[in-house]
Amino acid sequence: MTIRTSLRPRADGRKGAPDQDAKIAQNSGFLAVSAGLVGVVSYVCSLLMANLLGTADYTQFAAAAMILGVVGIVANALVPLPLSHIVAVHRKGSEERQDGMAFSVFVSCLAGFAAATITGSVTLAIATPDLAAAVALAAFVIFVVNAPAGWLQGELRFTWYAMSTIGEVVLRLIFSLLVIAMAWNAGGAILGFVVGCLAPLVVPWQFYRDLRWRPHVLLQRWRWAETTDIASVLCVVSVLVGLDVMVVGFLDSGSVDAAGFQALATIAKGPVYVAAGTALVAFPLLRTPGAKVGEVLGASFASFGQLVVVAFAIIATAPPLMSGLIIPQKYHGSLGLLPWLAASGLGYAVLMVLTTVLLAVRAYRRCQIGLACACLLVIGGLWIGWQLNAVTGMAVGSAVGAVTACAVLTVLARPALEAARPGRGAGAFLVLAIVLMVVLAVAAQLQPLLWFAIAAISGITVLAHQRGMLPHRNDFKMVRRRQVGRRSKATGRRQRRAAHLR
């Protein structure tokens, strides 16, 4: 899609963020850990509801939670990244930033109303009016709270962002305990999503100071064009990440094999948490005026590579004794699928990072072509795998499709990412990755506790190494100042020499 750049305001050269928030490596690791913690707490909430709600209530709760999960995917794609670009580019209090924030809030509210209407109507067809009202309210609130999230990303306040997401699920957990204590039904449990969304609204006051009533921004086509480009790509990526779980549930609903696949696939998506952390940090930095694109890309890929390889190696080599502690015993027959599902998680993680980076550098056409190929490969892998060997074949097909898709997208993205010198140091990195995989695999066969020790040391080591990998975003301006100073001195010397000759 072509955007009329002549109608877009130019960047006003906002100042860089604080040093502690300007490091991709440090923040990527922190966001990956926080995303994992969010997943764990969400899983605990689901377990509480499964064990303590009645069968009928839990069935309705699970269906409503799945609907809200789809709403969250769309909301996260529609608002935060386009707003983070506006915030990263323009200064506090500027007209351009206020216009962009007004547009994002309007879009959030309009989309929230639409989501509330659709989800409420769908839920009403399968549940009580009380539950339908709770789902509609939750859908609206989920959209509204994404504007503060985009502002935090654009301001590079990743610590605050991570704490708000953790606070959201913790509030939901506390409210879930209240629901159980008060013996409320599924509608009360769904209200936990609404209560949890109070946490993301707690942001620095500057966010609210820049909010203005400017409905005319909805008539600016270039804003809709860019938002549509970003949102459509992220929606497709999000659907691809969860497609295997949805498809296997549809094709083999109710079977132990399908449930085991779904439970393991949720764990195997660990690398996706790493990708989400890297994407959240890299996008606003790459859109910042004066950013050294090559260094940002290089640091992003280095940070992501280290984290994702360790996450993949740990998940793929996990001994049954360890993974069995997380998965219920009735699903232990599916533990052999974990290495394949871990490979698919790795492929999805690479897809997420590459598509986000291509969006950040505005390589929209390459991103869309690569994503179209990824859809064909992933869906084809799932279909062929199912035809050959049902659930087990789908796990293998998911891995083959996802890894092939990320390889194709890597080839397509390479010309747009030349500034990062892709491939530099890949040989040594690949050797280290293979060594780690072999060591963990051997340790898993010999002694699960030895595997656990090596896995823990590897994870802690790579997180500690993440600190200080990225030059500060202000370095560009510092270099320019030094260059200007040198030119000034040289100019002064030439002027003095000319005066002496005269």
Image (cartoon, rainbow, N blue to C red):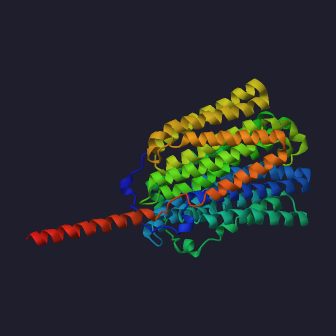
Q: Is residue 479 visible?
A: yes
The spot of residue 358 in percent (x, y) is 50, 46
Q: Residue at x 49, y 40 (%)?
A: 413
Q: In the shown orientation, is residue 53 left or right of residue 422? A: right
Q: Nearer the viewer, residue 406 or 455?
A: 455
The spot of residue 475 in percent (x, y) is 44, 63
The spot of residue 309 in percent (x, y) is 65, 45
Number of numbered discs on residues: 0
Q: In the shown orientation, is residue 448 left or right of residue 374? A: right
Q: Residue at x 75, y 49 (%)?
A: 455
The spot of residue 214 in percent (x, y) is 48, 67
Please say if 473 is above or below 420: below
Q: Residue at x 51, y 70 (%)?
A: 213
Q: In the shown orientation, is residue 437 left or right of residue 428? A: right
Q: Residue at x 57, y 67 (%)?
A: 20
Q: Farthest residue in the top direction?
A: 388
Please say if 63 is above or below 217: above
